[in-house]
Image (tube, helix red, strand yellow):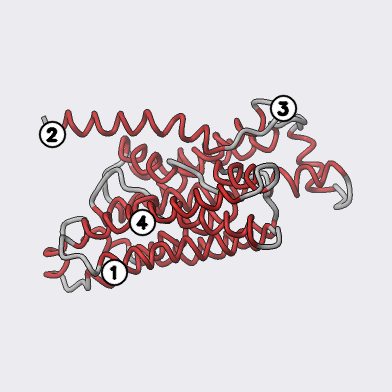
């Protein structure tokens, strides 16, 4: 399919899903109600709060988060030249989880404190992985992947210790629910926070998109073209990690979006990071809006969204591996 048409169709689908998501929920809303509320509604009315402060803020946050996670996914896969790499490879998710757990158990309970700790530990995990990889003598990419696995294992170990020490009636359920991910705590303050940080990262990555394309051809080719491979890779990794850490700090662990979206795009668009970054972000937003809408409307109790993305993502990973194996044959 032509890339231009793919972008137009995906954008239209995203817009329709946003509208549908505003209408669907425990309390069904008619399209005319949304129009009347936006044009004539009073800020203190129940209907205005439901549409504007609860549903619309959530849809916007979900869209930005899906776009951010998918962009980080395609960047990681391009940098490491591996189609199944995600944020977990550098220990980002496990580091952020550890930070959130520490905040829940040892600090005064506050969503802001949890966000700050999750964000700081997510970034810290990447710094630790980069420093650890420099001590290894193997291939740089392989060393970074191994360092990320080690970092994730260390973070997970400390997380289990904290869960063991946590109050089983108050703190432990909070940790487990946060780890399963969800947008139940969506506010406009969170939207602004996520929008600012993800925009900064996305702009940096879009400016680097041509150099990232060259990196997919190999380090030697990139060096011949005058690209500082080490600097570009570190900037790209930190920018992608900032995207993931920002989303995780607000919504908890949202699995598989960074893996699903780039591969779905590859089914109907060429594998060129310099041209499909925007399309990948739109597809990521579409996937997460669908998952979140189902999560909050399927039952009377909201389902953690990561459960739904994992149910789709795990079989999809098997499909990717089988497809790659058949291609090699």
As drawn, the label of residue 328 is 2
Residue 107, located in which quarter of the rendered image?
bottom right
Query: Marks 2/4: CA distance?
Result: 27 Å
Number of numbered markers: 4
Residue 249, located in which quarter of the rendered image?
bottom right
As drawn, the label of residue 232 is 1
Horizontal side, residue 156 vs residue 301: left or right? left
Label 1 residue SS = helix
Please state which of the two labelled residues, at mark 1 or mark 4, is closer to the viewer. 4
Among numbered discs 1 and 2, the one appearing first in the sequence? 1
Tell me if residue 250 comes above or below residue 289 in the rendering: below
Label 3 residue SS = loop
- Name the residue rendered at 25%, 33% in the picture: 321
- List the residue tagged with mark 4: 90
The percent coordinates of residue 322 (x first, y second) are: 24, 29
- List the residue tagged with mark 3: 300
Q: Nearer the viewer, residue 136 or 290?
A: 136
Among numbered discs 2 and 3, the one appearing first in the sequence? 3
Query: Marks 2/3: CA distance?
Result: 47 Å
Query: Marks 1/2: CA distance?
Result: 30 Å
Please state which of the two labelled residues, at mark 3 or mark 4, is closer to the viewer. 4
Query: Marks 1/4: CA distance?
Result: 17 Å
The percent coordinates of residue 83 (x first, y second) are: 27, 44
Say which quadrant the C terminus sits in: top left
Label 4 residue SS = helix
Label 2 residue SS = helix
As drawn, the label of residue 224 is none
Horizontal side, residue 249 vs residue 81: left or right? right
- Name the residue rendered at 70%, 46% in the picture: 170
Among numbered discs 1 and 4, the one appearing first in the sequence? 4
């Amino acid at each position: 399919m032509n890339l231009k048409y793919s972008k137009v169709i995906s954008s239209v689908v995203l817009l329709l899903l946003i509208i549908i998501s505003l209408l669907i929920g425990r309390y069904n809303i008619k399209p005319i109600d949304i129009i009347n509320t936006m044009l004539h509604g009073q800020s203190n009315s129940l209907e205005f709060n439901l549409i504007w402060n609860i549903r619309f803020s959530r849809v916007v946050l979900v869209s930005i988060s899906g776009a951010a996670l998918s962009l980080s996914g395609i960047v990681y896969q391009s940098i490491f030249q591996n189609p199944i790499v995600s944020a977990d490879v550098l220990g980002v998710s496990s580091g952020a989880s550890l930070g959130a757990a520490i905040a829940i158990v040892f600090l005064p309970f506050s969503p802001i404190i949890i966000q700050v700790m999750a964000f700081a530990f997510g970034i810290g995990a990447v710094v630790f992985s980069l420093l650890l990889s420099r001590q290894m003598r193997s291939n740089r990419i392989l060393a970074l992947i191994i360092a990320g696995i080690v970092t994730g294992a260390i973070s997970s170990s400390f997380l289990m210790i904290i869960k063991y020490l946590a109050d089983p009636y108050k703190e432990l359920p909070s940790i487990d629910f946060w780890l399963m991910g969800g947008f139940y705590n969506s506010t406009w303050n969170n939207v602004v926070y996520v929008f600012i940080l993800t925009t900064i990262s996305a702009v940096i990555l879009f400016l680097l998109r041509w150099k990232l394309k060259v990196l997919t051809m190999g380090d030697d080719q990139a060096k011949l073209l005058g690209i500082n491979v080490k600097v570009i890779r570190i900037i790209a990794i930190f920018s992608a990690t900032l995207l993931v850490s920002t989303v995780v700090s607000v919504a908890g662990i949202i699995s598989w979006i960074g893996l699903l979206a780039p591969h779905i795009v590859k089914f109907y668009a060429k594998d060129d990071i310099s041209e499909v970054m925007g399309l990948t972000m739109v597809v990521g937003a579409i996937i997460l809006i669908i998952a979140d809408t189902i999560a909050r409307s399927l039952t009377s109790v909201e389902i953690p969204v990561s459960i739904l993305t994992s149910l789709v993502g795990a079989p999809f990973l098997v499909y990717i591996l089988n497809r790659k194996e058949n291609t090699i044959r």
